[in-house]
Every structure is written in C-alpha cells, then in structure tokens.
Image: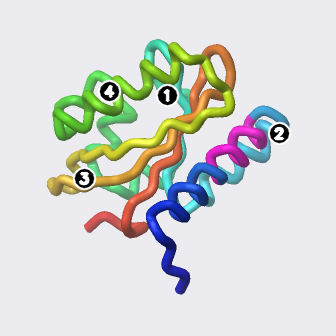
Amino acid sequence: MNLFTEKEYRIQSQHLAFRLKHLFQNDRNSFNSIVDFLPQPVYVNDRETLEYEVFADVFFSYGQEMELLYEIGIEYLPSISNPHLYQNAINKAKILNLKNDFDEVSDYLQCVSMNGKMVTYFTNKILLNETLSLNTTFFHTNKVD
C-alpha cells in the first residue's frame, strides 16, 4: 500500500482530472465507459446552472442522499451540505469560471450527508469547455458506511 503526502495526493488527483478531461474531449465514448468503472465518483455539470450532464453510477452506492441529489438536482445540495464548505465550493467554482482558465484545477473540501452521516471528501474541478466542467471526488475510503 502506497502512502502519499498531502501534496503528492493533490498532484495525483489533479493529474487524474487532466487525463479525464482529455479523454472527455477526445473520445467521449471511452470517457462514458470508464467513468462507471472508476472507484471514485466523477460528474460533469453545466458551468452556469450546475445541472448534471454526467453523473457516475458509483455515486448511488454512497447513499439515498446521492439518489435524491441526482433526481432533484443542485437545489438539494445545500440541505445536505456543511454550509461553510458548501459556500467555499460555490465561491471556488465561480472564481474558476471567471478566470476561464482551462489549465487550472480548483480543489476544495466538501462535507455532505451520506447514509445519514456527514462525510468529508475532496473535489477537483476543471473546465472542459465554455459550458461544462468536470469534477472528480475522492473519499478517504471507497465506501461510506
């Protein structure tokens, strides 16, 4: 088992975001196939409305709340989120959108209710094009109890 420092972990997770971005842009069919086999959830959403275009199936294994998030949409997220971390995520997404930097990865912590427990996880956001962003999420474990 490899143990990484926090910096190494961030670099590896950002590298994955870049690789998935390039796959999305160059081979959308392969991207769609791979996303459902990755151990960490990935989603693609609209940069303005935040509506989901891709929502990996593995999200549904993280609890009823994720099913509701997918069904109801982004409007549901504040009701299951830590307010401070939620606002931080929204602010970072807005800044990334304003910069319009397609080579930057914005990373931040989030904390949401999953199976009735508050779970903290790490998210990378990278811009795909003028309308979409890719998000990779990393939990400290692959399963939320």
Front one among 95 and 55? 95
Residue found 62% across the figure and 59% down from its top:
37
Q: Nearer the viewer, mark 4 or mark 1?
A: 1
Task: Give residue 68's quadrant in the image.
Answer: top left
Q: Amino acid at mark 3?
A: Met
- Above or below, 141 against 87 in this view is below
In the image, residue 70 lies at what x, y percent? Answer: 39, 34
The rendered magenta stretch, by its main secondary structure, is classed as helix
Disc 4 to disc 1, C-alpha distance: 11 Å
In the image, residue 143 lies at what x, y percent? Answer: 37, 67
| Chain-order first, disc 3 or disc 2 | 2
Which residue bears the numbered disc 4? Answer: 72
- Relative side of 83 to 45, left or right: left
Q: Which residues are magenta?
A: 16-24
Disc 3 to disc 4, C-alpha distance: 16 Å
Disc 2 to disc 1, C-alpha distance: 19 Å
Which residue bears the numbered disc 3? Answer: 114
